[in-house]
Amino acid sequence: MRFSRRVAMYALILAVSSLVGGWFGPTLTAASSGEEVDQSVRTFTKVFDLVEANFADPVSSEKAFYDGAIPGMLRTLDPHSNFFDPKEMQLFREGQRGQYFGVGMLVGLRNGRVTVMHPFLGSPAKKAGLRPADAIIAVNGKNTERMGTSEVVDLLKGPRGTPVKVTVKREGVENPITFDLVRDEVVRPSVPVAAWARRGVAYIKIEQFNENTSKEFEAELKRLGEDQVEGLILDLRDNGGGILQEAVAICERYLEKGQSIVSQRGRIQAERSYVGRRGNNGRRYPIVVMVNRYSASASEIVAGALQDHDRAWVLGDNTFGKGLVQAPYPLSHDCQLLLVVARFYTPSGRLIQRDYSKGTFFDYYYKKDTATRNTRDQRTTDTGRTVYGGGGIAPDEKYTPPALDPFQIQLLGRYAFFYFTARYFGPREATLPKGWEPDDRILAEFRAYLKEKQIPVSDEEFDKHRQWIAQQLKLEMYTMGYGKEESDRVAVLYDPEVDKAIESLPKGKALLERAQKMVAQKHAR
């Protein structure tokens, strides 16, 4: 490694060590002396020099620093402080912006090959005719057989306006097909579904909180016609969070002016509070918020604020329990440190962060049961309901999705609906007539397909699950014929948890009325 490169690497380690140690910059308090840090860096340098000179295989300095030393140091702190190398930093920024340059399709591994899951609406891939289940066998003539998903994605991305050739193997088509695409801006909405779940009941899914979320939310309500909304189902399931300010903006739509939304407190900064600045402009319809254990961070801020002010009924499972605030620190070589600098608290004052001091970080991230509570952090909502910190947002009403039986698991696990749909269209045009529904003929073809693929299904099982099979076929057929966006809208109608949320709207209405009464009494004093 050249001397200048080595110096840059050591400077990067020193900068990160300084930030983590708490003495970088004039506003921070010293946690360890400069001499101690210097000694630690000298020790690290000596260890690295010995490894580089004597290890059995050549040593990559980037791998040693980016994948080893820096992440290893951060793992001694907490589960959420992160170091992003240039590639990870680019992906992080793309996620915040909700856009990137490429061909515009979701890919994943199916039967050992990187496969198109679905192209995005309006994307170069969609316009060119790429379809779900197309197995990508080459990009620009480069064989992808032994590549993973991320490697293929890297080949597909590129500057706007540049050409890329994508060669696929399609079900029911003998020879490979090559598509000539031109990369363009790909916009990924953070509000992918907004539809009427029932007459007067709007359903809106927020997938993540990026720079455009509040604008998208407003636009979708305007498209639906908010004056017709009598109840709202706000789906935050699997929403891992995102930009704090966007979560605050969603809360502001439904809280009174001056009501607290979230506050954050840290060692090196004064407490900062976010409150409703605009008021809810008379929006009085009841809300049910749907959450699960993968709802985290910014989505927990929304659920916690609406729950603490009794503005929404929360349905589902305990959320993830991430109550830590990260701040970005740009470093050299387009790297960035995302360091935990504070904790956030819901309006009632509870800290929802789960305990990560016991067990491994793997346990922390993948533990299925997050329903813990800190009994010493007991608070009350505006109307006096008891809530706890320490274990995410506990739902007002627990909901466990119905478990799949072995028959359903087998068909989904073998991707039967996915590949049958691809085979059905094959060389045909991927379109469907308006209002298409699976009929007996399609079900009979699917039954024959299962037999051909040696997927054991008895006539009794098939008849028992006939309605479910028709629903799954419809969703896959809609993804192919109309697009994933339309399929997702239909899926809302088949979701039993959405049905439960609709049933729970009167509970949200009762909470809202009690909260409004208390606000009125407070103003009358």
Image (tube, rainbow, N blue to C red):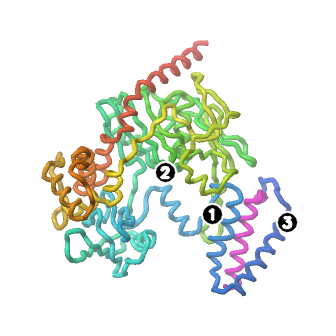
Please give left or right for residue 74 compared with residue 415 in the image.
right
> Mark 3 or 2, which is nearer the eye?
3
Q: Amino acid at mark 1?
A: Phe
Q: Nearer the viewer, residue 132 or 153?
A: 132
Residue annotated with mark 1: 83
Residue annotated with mark 3: 36
Q: Nearer the viewer, residue 95 or 484?
A: 484
Please give the range of residues in magenta. 1-25
Q: Position of residue 58 (x, y in %)?
A: 63, 86
The numbered dot on residue 210 is 2
Query: Is residue 273 visible in this depiction of the protein?
Result: no
Proximity of marks 1 and 2: CB atoms separated by less than 8 Å = no
Query: Is residue 288 visible in this depiction of the protein?
Result: yes
Q: Amino acid at mark 2?
A: Asn
Q: Main secondary structure of the magenta part?
A: helix
Q: Which element is circle 1 on?
A: strand
Mark 2 is surrounded, within 10 Å at the Cα level, by few (under 14), some (14 to 19) or many (20 or more) other residues, namely: many
* First of labels 3, 2 by sequence position: 3
Q: Which residue is drawn at the image coordinates 33% and 58% (left, top)?
A: 120
Q: Which residue is drawn at the image coordinates 54% and 65% (left, top)?
A: 88
Quadrant location of the C terminus in the rendered image: top right
Q: CA distance from mark 1 to mark 3?
A: 23 Å
Q: Is residue 263 above or below residue 55?
A: above
Q: Residue furthest left?
A: 441
Mark 1 is surrounded, within 10 Å at the Cα level, by few (under 14), some (14 to 19) or many (20 or more) other residues, namely: many
Q: Is residue 108 above or below residue 525?
A: below
Does 5 appear in magenta? yes
